[in-house]
Amino acid sequence: MIPLNPAKRNSSKLALTTPTKRPKDVETVTKYLGDMHALEAHILQAIDKQERLLATDHPDAAATIRAIRDTLRAHLAALQERLQDLGGSPTHPVKQAVAVVAGVAAGLYDKVRTEEASKDLRDDYTALSHAVIAYTMLHTTALALGDEETARLCARHLADNARFVKGIQEAMPDLVIAEYRQDGGFALDEGASGATRRVIAAIWMQPATTTGGAGPGAGLARKIVSGLLSRA
């Protein structure tokens, strides 16, 4: 993975891409930017510890975690800069939100382990998936409230985290087999990892069924969306 290295933005350009808004709009975007900063800061704390513990016994997993770590550090710097542009900060006004979003990464940090790199990456997958959907929500919020600069930031960060989630899922079958091989005592079918990757690829090629398409969850999804729209 290539770490994100966001270029410094021109301050005069920022002024043009951040039009005057209602205080409530700015407050809303600032609050959720703070939530994202808190969430990714807690994920980074856990991942940083993982990288140190896995460096010797699991160099490939450690390299993946290192790339995630470096990208999250860049995310935090960009989020902090955007918060400051909007008059907020990583600690204000999100003190209550920190306690909520920290729960996503708290278990991740407490359960860092050296003997099973696959479980570390599984937990990273969960935390990063939470960040992906949170960025999806913030991107929508920013666009709806006319904050295109924040929306572009969310799109970049969402793409980074989505690539990491996809990469972890693709690497997981080989890592699981490698750990069983390392433990010894198992009659392994070495083709299992390839078979699992093919299943994953086939599943993700299926069309989404949030608002249409076939599948057992499609009808329920349509009803939920229709219900939400009818109350809007």
Image (cartoon, rainbow, N blue to C red):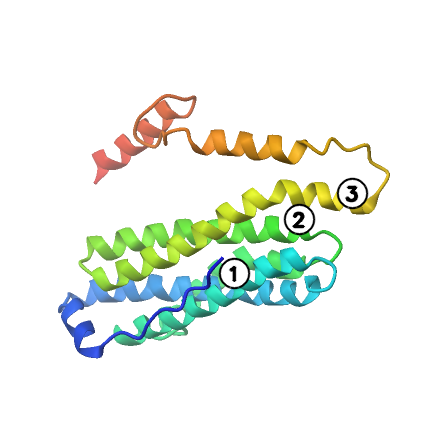
Q: Which residue is mark 3?
A: 181
Q: Is residue 56 left or right of residue 173?
A: right
- Name which residue lies at 34% across and 61% down: 32
Residue 68: numbered disc: 1
Query: In the image, what residue type sits under mark 1?
Result: Ile
Across and down, in percent, residue 128 comes to 49, 53
Q: Which label sits on residue 118?
A: 2
Question: Dots 2 and 3: beta carbons under 8 Å?
Answer: no
Say if 113 sits above or below 119 in the image.
below
Circle 1 SS class? helix
In 3D space, how far apart are the residues under numbered discs 1 and 3 (Cα atoms)? 26 Å
Q: Nearer the viewer, mark 2 or mark 3?
A: 3
Label 1 vs 3, first from the N-terminus: 1
Instruction: Give residue 122's position: percent from left, percent from top.
Output: 60, 48
Q: Which residue is painted at 42% across and 56% down in the image?
A: 160
* Residue at 37% from the left image edge and 73% from the top image edge: 80
- The amino acid marked with disc number 2 is Ser
Is 197 located above or below residue 47 in the figure?
above
- On the image, the x and y values in percent for residue 58 come to 70, 57
Compute the Cα span from label 2 to label 3. 13 Å
Quarter of the picture holding the C terminus: top left
Q: Amino acid at mark 3?
A: Arg
Mark 3 residue element: helix
The quadrant in which residue 156 appears is: bottom left
* Residue 68 seen in this snapshot: yes
Specify whether residue 87 is in view. no
Residue at 66%, 48% in the rendered image: 118
C-alpha gap between disc 2 and disc 1? 15 Å
**Nearest to N terminus: mark 2 or mark 3:** 2
Observer-nearest of 94 and 18: 18
Indicate whether 145 appears above or below 122.
below
Between residues 120 and 109, which one lies in front from this camera angle? Answer: 120
